[in-house]
Amino acid sequence: MSGALSASLEATLAVEMFLNENYRFRRNTLNGKVEYATLPKADVFRALTKEALNSIVIRAKREQILEKGSPKTEITEYVESEEVPEYNPAQAFLTNLPKWDGQNHIARIFGRIPGISSEQLNYLTIWLRSAVAHWLQMDMLHGNECVPTLIPSSAALSRIALDLHRLWQPPTILTL
């Protein structure tokens, strides 16, 4: 019995060593998908599809990381486990922004909406800062108490809404 246990443990450790030497994994908390990057270029993450998982298994077989049997079960168990660290792309984007330069960029963006008053501009600016604080779990008490509603009255407003969508979302979120 201990021989079987040690063989199982040995297989698990061999697979973990293979994965850690060749890949980086993370679980995207926004879309729930596991993403992976192939080393040494660990900055380019892609969704771990069935095809990508099979390619990892084939590589492990070619490198003969196990003395016998397929490493697919151990690899699948690893990538579907809590061993894979969580990654929140929105939080990573927000926490890696450059230091604030003192300019009210939010007001400048909302100021592109035609017919908006300075009072409305102030409310929208406060709302967005509050929403971001809520996303970052800095304020769990007041989240989503009010939501501004913009009623398009022209094609210009629709264009501005599309511009805002592009400006606010980092590239990693746009690919969800």
Image (tube, rainbow, N blue to C red):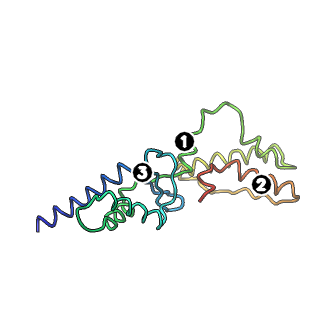
* Mark 2 lies on residue: 161
- Picture disc at residue 172: none
Reading the chain from its start, which is encountered first: label 2 or label 1?
1
Frontmost residue, 80 versus 69? 69
Q: Is residue 112 left or right of residue 26?
A: right
Q: Residues within 10 Å of mark 2 (few under 14, many from 20)?
A: some
* Residue indicated by mark 3: 24
Name the residue carrying label 1.
Answer: 95
Task: Identify which amino acid the numbered label 3 is placed on.
Answer: Arg
Q: Position of residue 81 (x, y in %)?
A: 36, 62
User: Which numbered disc flags the more N-terminal residue, 3 or 2?
Assistant: 3
**Mark 3–mark 2 CB contact (< 8 Å):** no
* Left/right of residue 54 with respect to residue 15 in the rendered view: right
Closer to us: 39 or 119: 39
Q: Label 1 neighbourhood size at 10 Å, few (<14), some (14-19), many (20+)?
A: few
Q: Number of numbered discs present? A: 3
User: Seen in the image, is 148 located left or right of residue 14?
Assistant: right
Q: Quadrant of the N terminus?
A: bottom left
The residues bearing labels 3 and 2 have C-alpha atoms spaced at a distance of 36 Å
The kind of residue tagged 1 is: Thr
Q: Position of residue 23 (x, y in %)?
A: 41, 51
**Quadrant of the image containing the C terminus:** bottom right
Residue 139 vertical placement versus 101 (above, below): below
Q: Position of residue 36 (x, y in %)?
A: 46, 55
